[in-house]
Amino acid sequence: MSGREPGRRLLALCVLAYPRATRERDRDYLSDLGLDLAESQGFARQAWSLLGGGVKERIAIRRRRRPRRLTWAGRAVAAGLALTALAVAAGGLVGTATGAQEVEQFACVEADSSATSQIPPAGDAGCAATARLVTAREQDGWDCTARVDAAGGRQSTTWDCVLESEAVTWLRF
Amino acid sequence: MYHAHVTEQTLFILASLTSGELHGYGIARDVDELSEGRVRLTAGTLYGALNRLTAEGLVAQTREQVVGGRRRRYYRLTGEGAAVLDAEVARLHSMAASLRARTSVGAKPRPGLA
């Protein structure tokens, strides 16, 4: 009988692989079944079998277990985290949109077309040069809007040019 | 109830209980003998299989007894278990007959597949 004690202890140890509920219910039965079968098949074989059976049962229980339901506090924290994440994401996008926009303004004044004798202001070759600059901007992808003001006998033209980054373009689409 | 997956172990456990109630160790010995040593049930496997079969209603635990200081649980085959065993044996018999007809010496090859 004493020769079986180490074997019994080994099997009792292997039974620990089973979930607590199973151990509480069937610990002695499992050990005794292992001892019975060990007489013809050996202790090592039963030990491995009990270890494997325990692990298998734990895995099966984990698979069957439903996902845990959140408490009210948990739900509040989850909702807060989700809102924060949304706010951060939205803020990031808005920041990208406003920060990526480049604005330039061009203006020129030319003499009244009726006063052909009037000398244009010094250093100003009329609006032609400015218009060429604006055209070049438009070719580079800028979006320019012209605003003409003819007050005081002189015609002034102002172009508001905006260049939007690819991120902004992507957002719009 | 139809049981799509009846493993060899399950089949032998059910077959071992056709002669009457047996305890776990007795089932393992009987299966060993019935399968000519091909199926050797260990403690973990047998415990899991008997629990599963009990949950499925194919076997039922009848009693627990302490013999020689060791606990033994006795099981019997239920009506459903017997029906599943019969159906599975019939299926295997039919499958074996079909395969035997095809593989037996002198069997004619099917036209177009020779």
Image (cartoon, coloured by chain):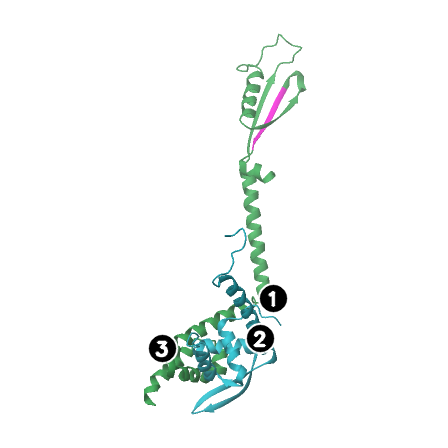
- Locate residue A26, reporting x and y percent: 48, 82
B4 lies above or below A163: below
- Could you say which chain is coloured cyan in the image? B
Name the side, left or right, on which A30 lies relative to A98. Answer: left
Name the outermost residue toward the front. B106
State if disc 3 and disc 1 touch (CB < 8 Å). no
In this orientation, does residue A83 appear? yes
In magenta, the rendered stretch is A156-163
Bin the neighbour count of mark 1 within 10 Å (Cα to Cα): few under 14, some 14-19, many 20 and up: few
Q: Secondary structure at mark 3?
A: helix
Chain letter behind tag 2: B
Q: Colour of chain A?
A: green
Residue ID at (51%, 64%):
B99
Q: Secondary structure at mark 1?
A: helix
Front residue (pair B47, A11): B47
Please name the residue that numbered disc 3 is placed on: A44
B79 lies above or below A127: below
Would you say residue B19 sits in the magenta stretch?
no
Q: Is label 1 on the same chain as label 2?
A: no
Residue type pointed to by label 3? Ala
Please name the residue that numbered disc 1 is placed on: A72
Q: Earlier in the sequence, mark 1 or mark 3?
A: 3
Cα–Cα span, label 1 and label 3: 50 Å
Residue ID at (57%, 43%):
A94
